[in-house]
Amino acid sequence: MNKVNVYGSFTQALFFSGMSTVPKLLLTQYRELGLSDQELILIIQILSELNITAYPAPELLAVRMGTTPDQIEDMLARLAQRKFMAIEKKWNPEAKRWVNAFNFVGLIEELADRWAIEKMLEFKRDDADAEAAAAHEPGTSKSAMERLVTVFEQELGRPLTGLECEHITHWLAAHFSEELIIEALRRGVSAGIRNFRYLDSILREWEKKGFRSRAEVEADDANFQTRQEKKAQGKSGGSRKSLHNPDKYENFYL
C-alpha cells in the first residue's frame, strides 16, 4: 500500500470511527465550575462512550487518560460530591439485569443556570444600549419627554395639561432639540407669554432659519441687535431713540 492510499484509508477511518460532540458551554465554563483539566477530559471521555455503553469502565478510562483506575475513581467521587455527576442503576433489557449508568443531569442544570444568567446579562446590556441610543434620539426618547415636562412644570409653576404635553411630543418628533425647546420656553416666560402657540411660533421660525442649537439662536440675536443699532444711528435729526431690542416673536402667536 503506497503512502497516498494509507493517508486516504486513515482519513476514512478517522471520520467514520464516530464523532463526539462536546457542549461549547462546558469548554468555556469548566474553570468557572471549578473543574480541573483532567476532570474535564474525564467527562469528555465518558460522553464519547455513552452511545456505546452507559458506564465506561474506570479501567478503560484510566488507559485512555494515562492514569490509574484509583485516580479515575477519585475524580468520579469528586464530581459526584459536587453533584455534577451521579452513578445510578439502569435496566438493561438486552442483558436483562440492572447495570451502572452515568447521569450528568447535575452538570447540565448548572450549565443551564449559567447560560440563563449570561442571557439575562446580555438582555440587560442590550436594554441599556437601547436606552442610551434613545437618549440621543429626541423623537423617540421617553427620558427627553420626562425631562422637558419637569422643566416646563417648574417654570410654569403647575402641572401640564394633556394638550400641552402633546405640543412637546410633536416638537420632539419634529427633531427640535431639548436645548431649543427650553430656550423657547425661557423666552416666553421672560416676555410674560406662556401660550404654547407662542412657543411653537418661535420654534418654527428657528426651523426656517435652520437653527439647531442655542448658540446659533444667540448669534442671530446679536446680529439683530447690531442691525437695530446701525438703523438707529443712521437716522438724522430728532431725539435719540431707545435701542431696546424688541421681541421678534411677540406677534407670532396672535
Image (cartoon, rainbow, N blue to C red):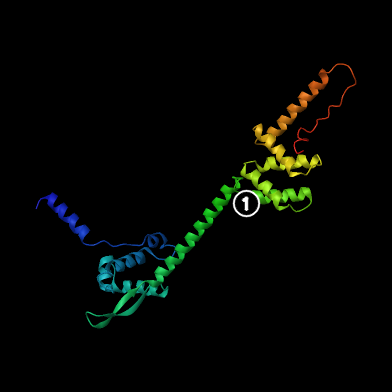
Foreground: 231 or 11? 231
Q: Which kind of residue does numbered mark 1 sit on?
A: Lys
Number of numbered discs visible in the structure rendering: 1
Q: Residues within 10 Å of mark 1 (few under 14, many from 20)?
A: some
Q: Residue at horizontal 49%, vertical 62%?
A: 117
Residue 193 x %, y %: 79, 42
**Residue at far bottom of view:** 97
Foreground: 5 or 252? 252
Q: Relative to 238, is 120 above or below?
A: below
**Residue at far right of view:** 239
Q: Quadrant of the C terminus?
A: top right
Foreground: 148 or 90? 148
Instruction: Report whether 89 appears left or right of 198.
Output: left
Q: Residue at horizontal 51%, vertical 57%?
A: 123
For mark 1, give the secondary structure.
helix
Residue 27 x %, y %: 38, 60
Q: Residue at horizontal 18%, vertical 56%?
A: 12
**Residue at far left of view:** 1
The image quadrant of residue 99 is: bottom left
Instruction: Report whether 121 appears left or right of 172.
Output: left
Residue 129 x %, y %: 54, 51
The image quadrant of residue 237 is: top right
Foreground: 90 or 229? 229
Instruction: Report whether 211 appears left or right of 115.
Output: right
Residue 87 x %, y %: 34, 77
Q: Relative to 131, is 115 above or below?
A: below
The residue beneath circle 1 is 142
**Residue at far top of view:** 236
